Image (tube, rainbow, N blue to C red):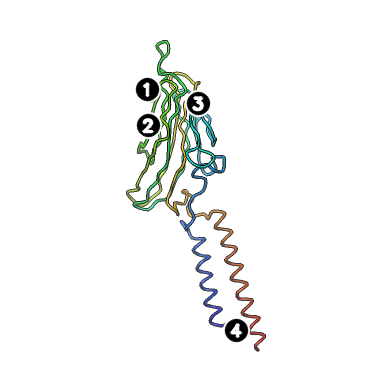
Amino acid sequence: MVGLKAIQTAGALAGLVLCLAAPGASLAATNLGFESGNVSGWTASGTGAFGATDSLGPFAPFEGLFFGFVEGGEQDVYTTLSRAFDLQAGDEISGEVGFRANDVFEDGGTIFNDDGYLTINGLTLFSRDVAAVGDFGDSGWVHFSFVAPTAGTYLLEIGAANRGDGGFASAVVLDNLFVPTGGGGGVGGIPEPQSWALLLLGFGVLGASLRSRRRLQLQRA
């Protein structure tokens, strides 16, 4: 029979494995700062350009090598990037956001007041337009933060739209996004790849421990 110590060891390792596989475990959502060089994990909509880049007009990464962006496309239609996060009451989301105007406010009597925003669950935390930053101006990086009032799923969204035409696209940029560990990225507790690796490692250690103790007991017998 397997000894008491082996059973205790197995129980401890099994508990570790279950913890790693549990929803909202200790690993944070990935690609928050777009350091993968793409928008993996994010949802895009609209007709304008979007993605991750290391340079856009006057903007360089606030941290790391890349940042995310959206540009206006079809006139008066927002191009957006969004992502959902599962938060507990009191959890805080923070980061850096900016607006780059690639147009003039008015030309020949036509208004080209492109605009952009950042919202969380519809609450506007950042909003700029050409009128605010000036012709071909920019806001620079602006810090934002949001504290969840209750537990639930919160949708962060950035958007940019062209006004007066469908060209000279202005943009919203996003970087250095922080979400509390276990935010989960709105994926309903599906473990990240790192979790799967640790899960397999835990099973391997568990199996090796039981085999070793079994061999010792057979030798003593």
Where is 214 relative to 180, above or below?
below
Q: Are marks 4 and 1 in contact (CB under 8 Å)?
A: no
Identified at 55% across, 74% down, the residue is 10
Q: Which residue bears the numbered disc 4?
A: 1
- The three-letter amino acid code for the residue at tag 3 is Gly
Q: Which residue is mark 1?
A: 131
Q: Which quadrant is home to the N terminus?
A: bottom right
Query: Which residue is depicted at the point 48% across and 52% down?
Result: 28
Q: Please state which of the two labelled residues, at mark 2 or mark 3, is closer to the viewer.
A: 2
* Pointer 3 residue: 73
Query: Which residue is the site of mark 2?
Result: 127
Horizontal and vertical percent position of residue 31 = 52, 45
Q: CA distance from mark 2 to mark 4?
A: 68 Å
Indicate the amino acid at tag 4: Met
Location of the C terminus (image quadrant): bottom right
CB contact under 8 Å: marks 3 and 1: no
Question: What's the distance in space between the residues labelled 4 and 1, CA to CA?
Answer: 79 Å
N-terminal of the pair, mark 2 or mark 3, is 3
Residue that appears at 42% across and 32% down: 140
Q: Residues within 10 Å of mark 2 (few under 14, many from 20)?
A: some
Quarter assignment of residue 94: top left
Real-space CA distance between mark 3 and mark 1, rounded to the nearest whole angstrom: 19 Å
Q: Earlier in the sequence, mark 2 or mark 4?
A: 4
Q: CA distance from mark 2 to mark 3?
A: 18 Å
Q: Is residue 40 above or below residue 171?
A: below
